[in-house]
């Protein structure tokens, strides 16, 4: 089959990379793609926000399947438009995409469906928002309701900070239209995990677990970003937790959409907090996570083209996914200065050496200038490696990154730390038990 992928980031590179390696796929076309994607797909320069241009491209190319990577074209109704022209699409329509496009819609739906999530109220007026903040006290979370590229959330340690955030969003114009409605949420404590599902009608197929690192700096400090690294599987998501997320979160959410007459076809991404009361939803996305997609595609052993086409056609039932049992870990190399301002156009060398050292380099914000690869975005590369454990995958990814020659690049040094701490604990326990049995530890 011929597949058209929409988008040009690290997630889309991972999707194109995997599709190219799928026996059922003959050709991959990507709009707009990037210089790394160009190794795995034919790139066509149509922006992921150009709905008319993408529809025209699909009409020309006549792909058997379109896979939409980012949320913005989904929220803008690209999938409905293509389906209207008889093209099979993996990605939800505009109505279903509101799960991500409107946090207030998602929270109302969860309340209706009894899905565990933080207590919340929605406000459009500053005074009312501030009254809620004073009433609840800190810590408290203030979120722009609309799309804000992962940056519209303020986890406030004090009521003053929360008030300033609400004022910025509602009275100021911090996130434009997206911030003119805010959701104020109870602060949840715990470890976060990403639980993704392929969904088509009533069929819901869980992907293996993963964990993102949203904070810019080591030990999860500094400002929030789109994600500085991810790994899969995430050992904090035990089989019991995975089952709870499927039965108490994914199924009732898809059923509540259906009760409103909305069908979901695509990826349902539940960002969950593993609290002492069980997993609770922090956010829904309606697409693969970026960078979670990079380790997930590295580990997926099934034919991705076949699976996504089956979902697009409503034939997901009975499909099973096969996974490489090893762990995969992706370290994001970002432009120094991100998520604030940074300089573009810096040459990046050593990419072949990184791959020769055993990692896969997924391109995100890169461009080609005079035959050289330069940085063109905040998150630039996703260096991804496999290992028998998360610790080994981490060691392999960082060893490969040493070959990268990019003085203006920045990356965290501790991606995977929570899983590795868990692995060490398990090993130490096993050693103690062995010693207690009188064997050599
Ligand atoms: P979101 O885009 O809604 O997932 O929020 C971005 C990040 O903010 C999450 O990954 C969490 O780290 C944090 N966050 C969001 N909501 C809450 C909450 N209710 N309690 C604690 N942290 C939160
Ligand atoms: N990695 C977080 C996201 O894709 O939203």
Image (cartoon, rainbow, N blue to C red):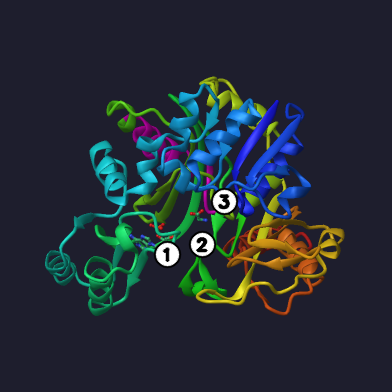
Q: For residue 325, what is the image quadrant?
A: top right
Q: Is residue 430 left or right of residue 186?
A: right
Q: How busy is the neighbourhood of tag 2: few (under 14 within 10 Å), some, or many (20 plus)? A: some
The quadrant of the picture occupied by the C terminus is bottom right
Can residue 299 be seen? no
Q: CA distance from mark 1 to mark 2?
A: 7 Å
Q: Nearer the viewer, residue 311 or 125?
A: 125
The numbered mark, 2 or 3, whose residue comes first in the sequence reads 3
Q: CA distance from mark 2 to mark 3?
A: 15 Å
Q: Main secondary structure of the magenta part?
A: helix
Region in magenta: 232-255
Residue assigned mark 3: 210
Q: Residue at x 38, y 56 (%)?
A: 275
Residue assigned mark 2: 226
Check disc 1 and report its element: helix, strand or loop.
loop
Number of the front mark, 1 or 3: 1
On the image, the x and y values in percent for residue 360 come to 76, 55
Q: Which mark is residue 151?
A: 1
- Does the closest atom of ligand 2 sit within 8 Å of the Cβ of label 3? no
The numbered mark, 1 or 3, whose residue comes first in the sequence reads 1
**Residue 242 falls within the magenta-colored stretch:** yes
Q: Nearer the viewer, residue 206 or 43?
A: 43
The quadrant of the picture occupied by the N terminus is top right
Question: Relative to 104, is 354 above or below?
Answer: below
Contact (Cβ within 8 Å) of mark 2 with mark 3? no
Q: CA distance from mark 1 to mark 3?
A: 20 Å
Q: For residue 428, what is the image quadrant?
A: bottom right
Q: How busy is the neighbourhood of tag 3: few (under 14 within 10 Å), some, or many (20 plus)? A: many
On the image, the x and y values in percent for residue 311 come to 54, 26
Check disc 2 and report its element: helix, strand or loop.
loop
- Does the closest atom of ligand 2 sit within 8 Å of the Cβ of label 2? yes
């Amino acid at each position: 089959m011929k597949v058209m992928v929409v988008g040009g980031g690290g997630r889309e590179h991972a999707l194109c990379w995997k599709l190219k390696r799928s026996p059922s796929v003959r050709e991959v076309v990507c709009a707009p793609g990037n210089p790394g994607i160009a190794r795995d797909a034919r790139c066509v320069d149509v922006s992921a926000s150009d709905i008319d241009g993408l529809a025209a491209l699909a009409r020309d190319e006549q792909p058997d399947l379109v896979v939409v990577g980012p949320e913005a074209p989904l929220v803008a109704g690209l999938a409905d438009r293509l389906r209207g022209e008889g093209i099979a699409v993996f990605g939800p329509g505009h109505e279903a995409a509101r799960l991500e496009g409107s946090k207030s819609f998602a929270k109302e739906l969860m309340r209706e469906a009894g899905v565990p999530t933080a207590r919340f109220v929605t406000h459009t007026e500053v005074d009312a928002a501030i009254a809620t903040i004073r009433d609840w006290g800190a810590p408290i979370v203030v979120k722009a309701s609309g799309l804000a590229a992962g940056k519209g959330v303020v986890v406030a340690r004090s009521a003053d900070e929360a008030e300033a955030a609400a004022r910025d969003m509602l009275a100021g114009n911090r996130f434009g239209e997206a911030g003119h409605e805010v959701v104020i949420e109870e602060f949840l404590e715990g470890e976060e995990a990403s639980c993704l599902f392929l969904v088509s009608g009533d069929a819901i197929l869980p992907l293996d677990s993963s964990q993102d690192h949203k904070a810019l700096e080591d030990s999860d400090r500094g400002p929030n970003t789109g994600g500085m690294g991810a790994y899969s599987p995430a050992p904090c998501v035990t089989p019991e937790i995975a089952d709870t997320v499927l039965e108490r979160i994914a199924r009732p959410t898809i059923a509540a959409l259906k009760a409103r007459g909305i069908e979901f076809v695509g990826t349902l991404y539940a960002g969950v907090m593993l609290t002492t009361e069980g997993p609770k939803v922090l956010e829904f996305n309606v697409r693969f996570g970026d960078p979670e997609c990079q380790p997930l595609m590295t580990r997926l052993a099934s034919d991705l083209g076949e699976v996504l086409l089956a979902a697009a056609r409503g034939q997901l039932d009975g499909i099973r996914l096969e996974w490489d049992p090893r762990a995969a870990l992706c370290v994001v190399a970002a432009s120094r200065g991100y998520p604030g301002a940074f300089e573009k156009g810096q040459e990046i060398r050593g990419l072949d050496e990184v791959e020769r050292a055993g990692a896969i380099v997924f391109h995100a914000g890169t461009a080609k200038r005079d035959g050289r690869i330069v940085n063109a975005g905040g998150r630039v590369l996703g260096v991804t490696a496999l290992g028998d454990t998360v610790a080994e995958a981490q060691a392999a990814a960082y060893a490969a990154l040493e070959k990268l020659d990019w003085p203006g690049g920045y990356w965290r040094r501790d991606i995977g730390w929570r899983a590795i701490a868990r692995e060490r604990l398990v090993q130490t326990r096993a050693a103690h038990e062995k010693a207690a049995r009188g064997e050599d530890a």
